[in-house]
Image: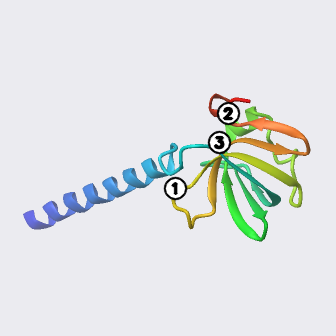
């Protein structure tokens, strides 16, 4: 009986550690490169939801995932599902994934239809 209890506690601890590690890796900027990256393309999908708003973008035939801020912050910046649509040209400025093969970036600024949305204004590159 005691062995089962120890195994249960060990398994629970391992699951909690794995979940915490995944959450840490997802949140923040640790998965991104230093220095700014600019991506231009056409929007293929828009998602304003948790944990982060995202755009899927076709950039010269490559499918990219552009992560923005959490929904409340993205909407507060003025970016809602009504300001952009599939097929619109978009410019995203931010930090790309450190994994070179991963077509993914975290945007601090998104430009659609000539309008700029600073979803992380404290991180926007100097002009």
**Which is more foreground, mark 3 or mark 1?**
1
Q: Which residue is at 56% across, 67% downward?
A: 101
Relative placement, left or right, of 3 versus 60 is: left
Q: Is residue 75 above or below residue 44?
A: above
How far from the left and from the top, in percent, is residue 55? 73, 55
Is any part of residue 124 visible from this angle? yes
- Mark 2: few, some, or many residues within 10 Å (few <14, many ≥20)? some
Nearer to us in this view, 37 or 71: 37
Q: Which residue is mark 2?
A: 124
Task: Identify the disc placed on residue 56.
Answer: none
Quarter of the picture holding the N terminus: bottom left
Q: Are marks 3 and 1 in contact (CB under 8 Å)?
A: no
Helix, strand or loop under label 3: loop
Q: Which residue is at 52% across, 44% downward?
A: 29
Helix, strand or loop under label 2: loop
Task: Identify the disc placed on residue 98.
Answer: 1
Q: Which residue is at 62% across, 58% downward?
A: 104
Helix, strand or loop under label 1: loop
Q: CA distance from mark 2 to mark 1?
A: 19 Å
Quarter of the picture holding the C terminus: top right
Tell me which label, 3 or 1, sits earlier in the chain: 3
Q: Which residue is mark 3?
A: 69
Relative placement, left or right, of 33 versus 105 is: left
Nearer to us in this view, 31 or 22: 31
């Amino acid at each position: 009986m005691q062995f089962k209890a120890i195994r249960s506690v060990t398994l629970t601890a391992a699951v909690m550690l794995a979940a915490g590690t995944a959450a840490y890796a997802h949140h923040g900027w640790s998965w991104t490169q230093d220095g700014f990256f600019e991506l231009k393309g056409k929007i293929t999908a828009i998602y304003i939801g948790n944990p982060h708003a995202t755009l899927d973008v076709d950039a010269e035939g490559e499918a990219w995932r552009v992560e923005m801020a959490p929904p409340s912050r993205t909407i507060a910046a003025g970016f809602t599902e009504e300001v952009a649509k599939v097929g619109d040209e978009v410019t995203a400025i931010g930090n790309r994934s450190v994994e070179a093969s991963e077509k993914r970036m975290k945007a601090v600024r998104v430009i659609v239809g000539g309008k700029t949305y600073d979803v992380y204004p404290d991180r926007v590159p100097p002009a």
